[in-house]
Image (cartoon, grey):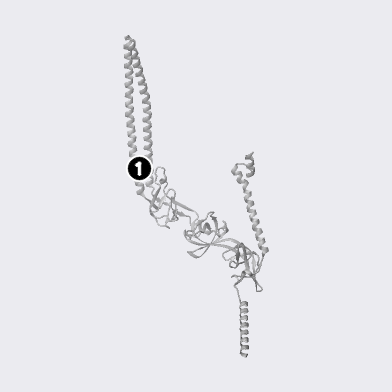
Amino acid sequence: MKKKIVLIVAGIAVILAAFFLLSGSREKITYLTVEAKRGPFEVLVYTTGQLEAENSENILIPEELGGRNVRIYEIKITDLIEEGSQVEKGDYVASLDHKAVEEVLASALLELEQSLNEFEDAKMDSNLNLSNARDQIVNAREQVEQMQIILEESRFESPAVIRKAEMDLEKAKRTLDQEIKGYALRQQQAATRVNRSQVNLSQREARVRELEEAYKSLNIYAPKSGMLIYAKDRFGQKIRIGATVSRWMPIIATLPDLSQMISVTYVNEIDISKVQPGQQVTLGIDAFPEKELAGEVITVANIGQPIPRSDAKVFEVRIRVFGNDPELRPAMTTSNVIRTGSYTDEIYIPSDAIFQNDSVRYVYLQKNNTITRQIIDAADENENFTIVRKGIGEGDKLLINRPDHSEELPIAGLDILEEIRKREAEQVREDNQARNDNQPRNETRRNGRPGNRANNQTTAGQ
């Protein structure tokens, strides 16, 4: 009996111990929290760029290669001085493929010789043919005179003989007239043939002259003083010895103006809506970690470029670097911090403390040992923090990690959610109104007269 009582008491003691242990473990559950802060807030976009000269002079293939009669559409670079070389105006820079022009020139000289022979042949044939035609005219005139004499001698003959003599004379006259007209046509034909041969000869001569000028221009010289930077082809690769240039991509190298530099960078499609021309930028130069330069955004591309082996896109942004630093060189890597927004006094929290369910954004607010799902009206954000317009105050404690049974926690701030939805609906109405306001102008341009689509259709029906 005593043993049974002892077992019961021991069991109760174990149950009580387990209860106190479990209850104690609940009380000791802790969460990682952060505080909402108030103060100045900056929205920053971080990018990496590359320095380029804002202005530069291009070194192009010779204009002589673009002549209409040259017909050399692309040519290789056979020699090119080292990139980064400092050149003076008139210094040698590059050489193009002489052999390619020599081959074309040799072919053009053969064509010229052939055209010259054709021209001489045309003149000789013309002289010979016209000489024969003149002889035929002389013979036709003599035939007319002979028929005239026969007719005069037959005046004492019978009427039949006289009639035959008259007919022979008429026939001789017709033949003479035909020979004279034929001679005029032969003259025109001969002149046309000679002129055609002469035009062809002139064209071949002009082509040879242009090719000779092009051959003389194949050595390229610097148009001004500066540092030589290789150009890039359509694939983004630098032009080097052996590369091909053409009249459509004629740039061999550039001479940048180092007094004004820009940083060319790319911003992802998530952040590009924040970046606008005129925004201030702080630039760091990887080659000179101690340098910190100021600049501003000057252009933002409207069309994105795909990232290789990715579905994401980036947009080109150009940043002007203020000042003139003689140590800056093209192709140096820059670290850019673009200041896209600045606020003097805002409540902000770490972005990690914000959770989202469908279109609702909320935080886990901890007050007096209770946790509430608090709906917030979030505004602008930077890399780590987000501004909160409504829902929390300065010093409020927020959970970073999602608590257990979070779906059972009470929700606060439904009035904020209603306000957000009203604001979004109003924005949709404004956007639709803006589109409708543009509709009449579009219809005017399309139909050539004022009025909306309905009015235009009514008028057409009438």
Foreground residue among 312 and 133 = 312
* Image spot of residue 345 (x, y percent): 64, 65
Identified at 33% across, 25% down, the residue is 133
Quarter location, residue 157: top left
Q: Secondary structure at mark 1?
A: helix
Q: Position of residue 166 (x, y in %)?
A: 35, 14
Residue at the outermost front position: 1
Q: Which amino acid type is marked by label 1? A: Ala
Q: Residue at x 33, y 41 (%)?
A: 110
408, above or below 139, in the image: below
Q: Which residue in the structure is indicated by mark 1?
A: 108
User: Relative to residue 375, is residue 93 depicted above or below?
Assistant: above
> Residue 273 location in percent, x, y?
57, 58
Residue 9 sits in which quadrant?
bottom right
- 67 or 442, which lies in front? 442
Q: What residue occupies the far top of the structure in this picture?
A: 156
Q: Residue visible at 65% across and 54% down?
A: 429
Q: Residue at x 58, y 67 (%)?
A: 352
Question: For mark 1, does the 10 Å Cα neighbourhood hold few (<14), some (14 to 19), or many (20 or more) residues?
Answer: some
Please identify the quadrant where the N terminus is shown: bottom right
Rendering coords of residue 210 (x, y %): 39, 43
